[in-house]
Every structure is written in structure tokens, then in C-alpha cells.
Image (cartoon, grey):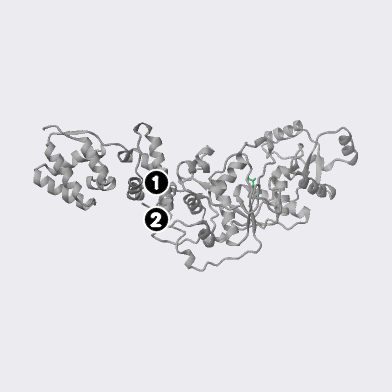
């Protein structure tokens, strides 16, 4: 097994890592329930969680469902299930509750409504009565002129009487925020100082839509403030929105949290992660037999955050120990490459870890037994637990997931071998072979010695004997050695297979 990541997680705890410590840490993961949790989302949630664990802070889950047109039924429920499956403990959020709820934005409309009154009252926000048709024309015109479409802030400048007229005519409106220039750098915990002047590229942003729902930017700022969020770790796609958020904080007279943006996750070949979300959704990994800790180590390995330490021995770290080693100063600001081989390696380590624990081994045995039963329903296999355990221990080094055991390579474990009509062996010789194997302690070495001496005694050429036995035992032409196969099967199963599959055709 090769580990490309050189186990960046090992040995770190022995080093004293220069790290700032933070007080009263409150972080949040704020997914929109527009789909299922995927690798990028899990990565964001995990970094927030590790940061909270490390600083003895709180991890908040907030569901950002203000875009009602994009909601996916059950997405929130499945996001929560996936986070829990990943080992993340939600301190505050839907279902668990907390002092700063509700934690679902659509249940917080009264809070946004109060907040918007402040901005309307002091003139930092205004009602915009522009129709969709006008906005569309503006967009088209800009594109024609090869300019970036942006709202021209027309309604900022309405006179009092114009406003009165619109109001009395009940013209529908949204509310926009007066975007100022932002020339200061944004201090990003991951990227350092970042300069973005939003007002150059966009008009005044909508903060309350005509349906009365807030937009992401507004609700996000209001909630982070009311939920006393201290640090925001989120995808880099939000970096250009941060000045807008900082301006909203300024308009409210609130202190903003600290921001750290997490770079893109990309495939090993540098391409973007699959557009087909299904391929990278957490439940897809789970259903394919990937364990949560393996997935967490895999994702963390791509994103960094741990001092680079070379070690020959790969290790699988718990979230607790990852949190101790985690240091935001070591987060990468370049895209994180995923290495799928590494996921298999981590999962293999997790299978082996489970096999070192009796209870967890029993669970694995049960999983394999039911997997085999459903893979080969026609064979009516009633697997013996100790046989299955034997197989698991033997195959542990080679497995990426337990389902590998029902792949073609391992088919022989669950099938009955092939019937062989051997012209080389007489009936008595077959009985003699079974008799001598029955006498020995069934280790690979003893089996090997017995077969060698049997071949010498009977003058049956060793390679011929091996070929015959291999077919009768496993039906395979190649694969693990005969003695090894017998050792895996154990005495009872091996002799049963030989007895039933090996016929003498020269009786
Ligand atoms: N709802 C946003 C998302 O799904 C959250 C962004 C943020 O963390 O501020 O990405």
C-alpha cells in the first residue's frame, strides 16, 4: 500500500506548533439546503469543527434557506445526518437548539425585519421600485456595450414625492443597500490581505427581496452578529462578497467576525470536482463503504492546516487529535488536490483499526455475512462467523472497502470451487490426501510440507497436484497459493471442498 500524503498528520503533536489561541470561539457551518452535503461542504464543516474543538468553542449549524425557489425537500435533514455520520457534534442548531435560535433562516424573518428598519431609518438602505423589465434592459444594454451588468442605483436618488407616489400606487419593491467604496484590504486568515472593491463591479445589492425574504448577504451578516459568531471559515467563492458584508457591519455599527476563506477542492489532475454532485456527495461515499474517519482524513489531507511533517508511517487520526494539530496558519491558499488513492488507503487503515477491536470486528463480520448473502442469493450461503473473521483478517491488507470482498477477485471465497475429474489421482490417493491433511495443524507451512511429501510419495508432479487442488478449492487459475487458500478456508472448509470437487477419473 502506497501513501502519497506522507502522513502529514503524524508526529505533529510532539512538536510545539506556534499557534494563536482564540477566546470565545463560535463558528458556524451555514449550508443552503439546495442539495445534499458534498465533499466541499464537508471540508468547510470539518475545518470549522476542528477550529471549535481546538479552541474549546462552539460549532453552530445554521440552515440558510432564504432562496425558497431552490429548496430541495429533505436536504436539511440529510445534511444533518451526514454531519453527524462524519463525527461532527453540533453544539447549536436545528433539532439540538441553543440560545441564539431559531437556526433556520426562514424562521428568523422577524429578526431581519427589525434589522432592516435600522438601515432604512438611517438611510443606509432604500426601497427600489425598478421592475424586472427595467433591470433586464439594463443588463442587456451593458452586455451590448461589453460591460459588466450592474444596477445603476436609480432608486437611490428618488425624490420624496416620487417615493410617495410609488407607495400610494403600491408598486412592488425590494430593498437595496447603499454600497460604498471599499478600499481597505480585507484581512483573511488564510489568504492574508485581500483587496476587493465591490462597488466598482456591482450596483447596490438587494438585501430584502420583493417576496420579503432577505438575501444571503443580509441574513448571513445579521445572523452571524446575533449568533455571536467569532470566526467565519467558508469557501473562497465568498471572498469577493466579504467587503459587502463588512460594509453591512459598518452600517449597523457592529464588530465583524474574523474571516478565513478556504480554497477550492480539485481533482488529482487539477480539474474541477465533478459537476455531477452525486459523485462527490457524502452519502455516495458512505453507501460505497467509506468510513467517516477515512473521509475526514482524506479531505483534511487535501486542504492542509497541519504542519508538513514527513513520516513513513501513515496514520489515521481522530477528529480530536486532528483538532490538536490543526493550525489555521498552515491552511493552504492554493487549491487542494484530492488524491483518491489516499481515500482507499485511509479506509483500509480504518478497516484494520476496526479489526483490532473485538466488538467492531463482530460488526464487520456481520456486514460481510449479509453482503455475501445478498450478493449470492441463489447460493444460500450460511457463512460461519469464524470463517468470515478468518477471511477478514487474511484480506485486511488488501481491502479498500469491505465490498471488495464480493468483487470478482475474491469470488472464490464464497463459491464452491470447480469440480475436477483428475486422471492423476486414484480414489485411494484422494482419500490418503484428505487423511494426511486432516491430521495436521492447519497452517500454511504444515499444509505446504504435507502436500510436498504427498507429491513425492505418490509421484504426482507437484505443479499438477497444485493445479488440480487450486481448481477444486477455488475454481481459480491463478491467485493466492494453494496452501494460503487452504489456510484461509480452514481445515473443515478445505477438506469439504476437496472431498466434493475432486473426483478420480481413473478409479
Ligand atoms: N449559505 C452559504 C453557502 O451555502 C454560506 C456561505 C457562508 O458561509 O457565509 O455556501
Towards the viewer: 489 or 480: 489
User: From the viewer's perspective, is 374 left or right of 306?
Assistant: left
Does dot 2 land on a helix, a strand or a loop? loop
User: From the viewer's perspective, is 376 left or right of 197?
Assistant: left
Is the residue 468 above or below the residue 447 in the image?
A: above
Is the residue 123 above or below the residue 74 in the image?
A: below
Image quadrant occupied by the C terminus = top left
Is the residue 29 above or below the residue 429 in the image?
A: below
Residue ID for mark 2 = 356
Per the rendering, the mark at residue 365 is 1
Mark 1 or mark 2: whose residue is earlier in sequence = 2
Residue 425 place in picture, x, y as percent? 13, 37
Residue 276 place in picture, x, y as percent? 52, 37
Question: Which of label 1 and label 2 is nearer to you?
Answer: 1
Is the residue 497 above or below the residue 263 in the image?
A: above
Label 1 – label 2 distance at C-alpha? 13 Å
Residue at image point 39% right, 35% down: 375
Residue 344 place in picture, x, y as percent? 42, 48
Mark 2 and mark 1 in contact (Cβ < 8 Å)? no
Does dot 1 land on a helix, a strand or a loop? helix
Residue at image point 24% right, 40% down: 496
Question: Which of the 4 quarters of the picture holds residue 54?
Answer: bottom right
Amino acid at each position: 500500500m502506497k501513501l502519497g500524503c506522507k502522513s502529514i498528520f503524524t508526529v505533529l503533536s510532539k512538536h510545539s506548533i506556534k499557534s494563536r489561541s482564540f477566546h470565545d470561539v463560535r463558528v458556524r457551518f451555514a449550508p443552503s439546503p439546495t442539495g445534499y452535503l458534498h465533499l466541499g461542504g464537508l471540508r468547510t464543516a470539518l475545518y470549522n469543527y476542528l477550529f471549535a474543538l481546538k479552541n474549546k468553542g462552539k460549532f453552530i449549524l445554521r440552515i440558510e434557506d432564504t432562496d425558497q425557489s431552490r429548496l430541495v425537500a429533505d436536504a436539511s435533514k440529510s445534511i444533518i445526518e451526514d454531519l453527524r455520520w462524519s463525527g461532527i457534534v453540533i453544539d447549536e442548531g436545528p433539532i439540538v437548539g441553543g440560545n441564539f435560535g431559531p437556526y433556520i433562516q426562514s424562521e428568523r424573518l422577524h429578526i431581519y425585519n427589525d434589522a432592516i428598519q435600522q438601515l432604512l431609518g438611517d438611510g443606509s438602505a432604500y426601497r427600489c421600485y425598478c421592475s424586472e423589465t427595467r433591470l433586464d434592459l439594463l443588463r442587456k444594454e451593458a452586455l451590448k456595450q461589453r460591460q459588466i451588468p450592474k444596477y445603476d442605483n436609480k432608486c437611490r436618488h428618488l425624490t420624496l414625492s416620487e417615493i410617495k407616489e410609488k407607495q400610494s400606487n403600491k408598486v412592488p419593491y425590494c430593498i437595496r443597500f447603499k454600497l460604498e467604496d471599499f478600499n481597505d484590504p480585507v484581512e483573511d486568515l488564510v489568504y492574508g490581505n485581500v483587496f476587493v472593491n465591490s462597488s466598482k463591479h456591482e450596483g447596490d445589492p438587494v438585501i430584502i427581496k420583493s417576496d420579503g425574504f432577505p438575501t444571503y448577504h443580509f441574513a448571513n451578516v445579521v445572523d452571524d452578529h446575533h449568533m455571536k459568531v467569532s470566526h467565519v471559515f467558508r469557501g473562497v467563492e465568498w471572498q469577493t462578497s466579504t467587503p459587502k458584508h463588512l460594509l453591512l457591519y459598518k452600517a449597523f455599527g457592529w464588530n465583524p467576525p474574523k474571516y478565513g476563506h478556504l480554497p477550492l477542492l480539485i481533482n488529482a489532475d487539477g480539474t474541477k470536482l465533478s459537476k455531477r454532485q452525486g459523485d462527490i456527495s457524502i452519502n455516495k461515499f458512505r453507501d460505497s463503504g467509506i468510513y467517516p474517519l477515512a473521509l475526514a482524513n482524506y479531505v483534511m489531507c487535501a486542504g492542509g492546516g497541519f504542519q508538513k511533517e514527513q513520516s513513513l508511517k501513515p496514520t489515521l487520526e481522530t477528529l480530536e487529535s486532528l483538532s490538536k494539530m490543526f493550525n489555521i496558519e498552515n491552511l493552504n491558499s492554493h487549491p487542494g488536490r484530492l488524491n483518491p488513492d489516499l481515500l482507499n488507503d485511509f479506509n483500509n487503515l480504518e478497516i484494520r483499526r476496526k479489526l483490532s477491536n473485538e466488538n467492531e470486528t463482530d460488526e464487520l463480520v456481520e456486514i460481510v455475512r449479509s453482503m455475501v448473502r445478498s450478493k449470492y442469493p441463489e447460493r444460500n450461503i450460511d457463512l460461519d462467523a469464524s470463517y468470515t473473521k478468518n477471511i477478514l483478517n487474511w484480506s485486511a491488507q488488501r481491502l479498500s472497502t469491505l465490498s471488495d470482498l464480493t468483487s470478482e477477485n475474491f469470488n472464490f471465497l464464497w463459491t464452491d470451487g470447480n469440480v475436477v475429474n483428475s486422471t492423476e489421482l486414484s480414489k485411494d490417493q484422494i482419500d490418503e490426501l484428505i487423511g494426511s491433511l486432516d491430521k495436521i495443524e492447519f497452517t500454511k507451512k504444515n499444509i505446504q510440507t504435507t502436500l510436498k511429501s504427498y507429491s513425492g510419495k505418490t509421484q504426482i508432479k507437484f505443479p499438477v497436484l497444485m493445479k488440480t487442488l487450486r481448481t477444486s478449492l477455488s475454481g481459480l487459475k491463478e491467485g493466492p497459493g494453494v496452501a494460503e487458500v487452504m489456510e484461509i478456508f480452514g481445515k473443515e472448509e478445505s477438506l469439504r471442498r476437496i472431498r466434493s470437487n475432486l473426483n478420480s477419473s481413473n478409479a
